[in-house]
Amino acid sequence: MSRLRPLLAGDACLHPASVHDPLTARVAADLGYESAILGGSAASLAVLGAPDLILLTLTELADLTRRITRAGAPPLLVDADHGYGNALNVMRTMEELEAAGAGGATIEDTVLPRPFGETEARLIPLPELVGKISAARSAAREITVVGRTAALSVTGVPDAIARAQAMEHAGAEALFFTGLADLDQLRAIEAATRLPLILGGTPKGLADAPTLARHRVRLALQGHLPIMAALEAVRATLAAQRAGLAPGGLPDPGFVRRMTREATQAQAVRDFLT
């Protein structure tokens, strides 16, 4: 069974760690995070060094997922965007991410990649969304299927609820909402749906985990800040070295050895190379 499913079935709201490579996965596990997420923006930055413009391929996402999960990540939710095409592509996406060790994957209803000449976000038709979620569920064996909608900020609360209900009926196991504006919207969603809820972000004044938990929110993202912090740390270190200065903020060597599992590797060398 997917390790993500018991967390969604619980009664707590968790903040998943945003991870983007094997070491961040191990740091998250070391800190005791119960879950982790590989966001599309973090994946695009890690693999391509580019904004999240749907330039990443499924192969690249699955490869990155595999590197993260094999390093010992907490149960991992992967942002699978639009499933890399139509409903048949969604099936392939779920199969590849499950094989890569993901605990769950989100399939969203935004029209992606951005069509020529369009400047505003647009959502796929509801029947197409239903087909994608149904296809995802038919392909999934252990991986958790999460239906994601951007309707709150694109078409409004009534459409967001209609899409959520349709995804429930199509076999989604959790519902992911972006663009939540206030508690009233959350209450309306809670009243109209039955599945565990995931929030892509929370407005000011609505980040309290116990409050969110009472409204059936089981995961609430906090932004993909670790990769941004890592970028700044690299910049500061290289800038100091270029200036002939000793860089600050370096991790304790013992921590590095633990995160890289140096003792395990050393033992393998003794066992098999000497």
Image (cartoon, grey):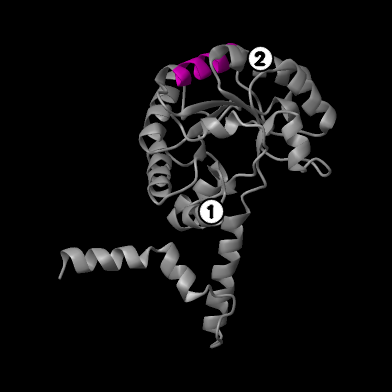
Residue denoted by label 1 = 28
Residue type highlighted by circle 1: Ala
Residue 129 part of the magenta-drawn span: yes
Query: Bounds of the magenta span?
Result: 127-137
Residue 4 placement (x, y as % from top left): 52, 34
Identify the residue shown where x is 40% and y is 20%.
139
Badge 1 marks a residue whose secondary structure is helix
Residue 88 placement (x, y as % from top left): 41, 19
Residue denoted by label 2 = 165
Q: Residues within 10 Å of mark 1 (few under 14, many from 20)?
A: many
Residue 35 placement (x, y as % from top left): 55, 43
Vertical relation: 24 (above or below) 115: below
Question: Considering the image in quadrants, where does the N terminus appear?
Answer: top left
Badge 2 marks a residue whose secondary structure is helix
Vertical relation: 45 (above or below) 136: below
Identify the residue shown where x is 40% and y is 38%.
101
Determine whether, in the image, residue 8 is placed left or right of residue 22: right
Whether tag 1 and tag 2 are in contact, CB under 8 A, the answer is: no
Q: In front of the other: label 1 or label 2?
A: 1
Principal secondary structure, stretch drawn in magenta: helix
Residue type highlighted by circle 2: Gln
Question: In the depicted view, which residue is nearer to us: 176 or 142?
Answer: 142
Residue 103 placement (x, y as % from top left): 47, 35
Identify the residue shown where x is 71% and y is 21%.
160
